[in-house]
Image (cartoon, grey):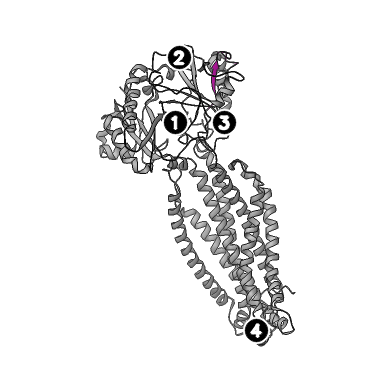
Amino acid sequence: MRQVVVGHALWQQAFGGTREAIGRTIQLRGESFTVIGVMPPGFEYPDRAEVWVPLMARYASYQDEWWKRRDTYVHKVAARLAPGATLSQAQADVDAIAATLASEYPETNRTSRLRLHSLRDGEVGPLKPYVLLVGGAVALLLVLGCANVAGLLVARAAAQGREIALRAALGAGLTHVVRRLLAESLVYAVLGAAFGLALAVAAVHALTVLVPVELPVWMQFGIDWRVLAFTSLVSAGTAVAFSLAPLAQFLRPDLNDVLKRGGRAGGGTGGHTAPRLRRLLIVGEVALSVALLIGAGLMLRSFARLMAVDTGVRTDRLLVASVGRYLPNITREEMLVGYADEFRRMRDALAALPGVDSVGSGSEVPYLNQAELGPPIDLYTRRRARREQAYRGQARGADVMPGYFATLGIPLLQGRDFTEADTLGRQPVVIISRRAAEVLFPGEPALGQELRWGNNTDYDPWMTVVGIVDNTIWHPAERQAAVEVYWSYRQYPGPTTHFLIRTQQDPTAATAAVRRPLQSINPEFSIRAIDTMDRVASASVWQRRLWGVLLGTFAGLAVLLTAAGLFGVMSYLVAQRTREMGIRLAIGAGRASVLRLVLGQGLRLTSIGIALGLAAAAAGSGWLRSLLFEVSTLDLATFIGAPLLLFGIAAAACLLPAWRASRVDPLIALRTDAWPASGGVSG
């Protein structure tokens, strides 16, 4: 009796969540299974699984000998470490097992290895560098925001210095002053937090729009209360800490000196300290912004290179329809009738649709496969018929219909395409890529040669090469070129295929028309998806696009914060030096010289920050090496373009305060109560 465990959601949906579900019979892929258990809510491993059956029950339904071979590796094993055991100890144990198997079965296990890793690393390991990168960018952005708040509060503290001193002279107590300052800062913090939370909610919604695929259960976008609490505490702490700066005036032993200086800038807080702190904050902001801009630039250039890869496949006006069916316990001859013959009927019906140029299909197609290739495989030729001589490396393969290559736009370089006559009982034939011909048959014609996939003489027949097609790249992010081997769908029939339909017009409009014949010919076949190849290609690199967009967004926010901070500091310094500017203009200085003076002060701070940011980016860019595609970590265009962009934005931020300084009326400036800031930069 075949048994099954069902997921909690399926239990609720199919059985109403009643205990009577235990012992009930359900149909899976045409076979009967008895429900023996229900999993708790939330358990969906692996990704969104709803039903679990014993592995051997699955094998019992296969007659194909391929599943029983010792060199068939199609499963991943999950195991729990014994109490007190480490991963390295477990790895040593399985290495010993692998060595024993290699000794007992050298033909199939000589090169087999087992590699252990944690379940977390196995599921989310490839994303870890991206998450750390974006997390670092968020941390830098938080620092920039806090630095901006600190700069504004320091400037405000300087303006409040005389007021606090006056309150102290009139008898205000320390508690009263602290309470007032804290109330102001907390109001600002609450308003800012509310605005930030609204932006976060909108950003999470925008992220879901950027992701064109259904995310796995372990990768969901949302607002985590712990992150929200941490950022709120840091931001509020910054606001509170720097809002108390005016207390320096309250704690001065001699308040008369402060009151005598009236509203002069030097009578603010900290003498030379406050202006110096503001400049240091600006330099730090510029440095962090440059580092973020360079990181974002490298990621975006990497994505642009990825999208520019010529895969050898034409994606325009192309629809992909994935169709499948499962027939238990059947022979290969029965598979030919149950799968290949039905696929041929569907192909003919699709080809007869108005506006369809050509139709092909294959068990695998470019872009639908992951960038990561599987374990190396062995390919044998007549000249390299022994295991030690065989080609061992990465390979792509698919059973395909006639018209597969023409529909994808892959040129046939030599020989012929498959035909409907290439069926069971005839000499097995293959079509290989130009790269495969060069690797497997170096220096000799490949047409007419024979090769074998594997070394099982009872199962792996010699196949004759009848055609050579151009090379393709199955995924733009492939870092290692693989040889490609294609065989006839009628000689190696399988339960699933991907129909490729090239249309004369927009393929999206043909989706409904394509679905109808697929459903009508055999309703037992499930249509898993119908989409355009352009969208499939875009979805295949969605993660890289997402991380690039995120990092670019954070870098843009960093630049805006830096520009706002620089504008605020320069505006404050100009206001503090209004009288000085009036004197300069009164004694004959030109407005252009005043403009250059103020603008130069801001650009000097920017230049120092850019230099520090470039040094930091160069030192840390090596960490991005594994995330980049055909882009150097010291890419010259990025390391020049990012600083120039920030320099231009900084110049624009400084220009308005500088222009205001140059337009000061000397008579009005000389009557003002403001005096040159004691910490100001003189001309």
What separation in Å lies between label 1 and label 2 (alpha carbons)?
A: 30 Å
Q: Amino acid at mark 1?
A: Ala
What are the residue bounds of the magenta stretch? Answer: 375-388
Q: Which mark is residue 459?
A: 2
Q: Amino acid at mark 2?
A: Tyr
Residue 246 position in % (x across, y down): 62, 74
How many numbered marks does the figure carry? Answer: 4
Which picture quadrant has residue 223? bottom left
**Nearer mark to the viewer, of 1 and 2:** 1
The residue tagged 1 is: 406
Examine the rendering and report whether any part of residue 129 can be seen: yes
What separation in Å lies between label 2 and label 4 (alpha carbons)?
A: 95 Å
Majority secondary structure of magenta residues: loop
Q: Secondary structure at mark 1?
A: helix
Q: Residue at x 61, y 45 (%)?
A: 624
Asked whether the beta carbons under mark 1 and mark 2 sit within 8 Å of each other, the answer is no
Looking at this view, is 388 or 125 the one in front?
Answer: 388
Residue 416 sits above or below residue 211 on the image: above
Residue 551 position in % (x across, y down): 55, 51
Q: Which mark is residue 189?
A: none
Examine the rendering and report whether any part of residue 675 can be seen: no
Looking at this view, is 584 or 90 the one in front?
Answer: 584
The disc, 2 or 4, on the residue closer to the chain's N-terminal end is 2
Which picture quadrant has residue 8? top left
Residue 593 counted in the magenta span: no
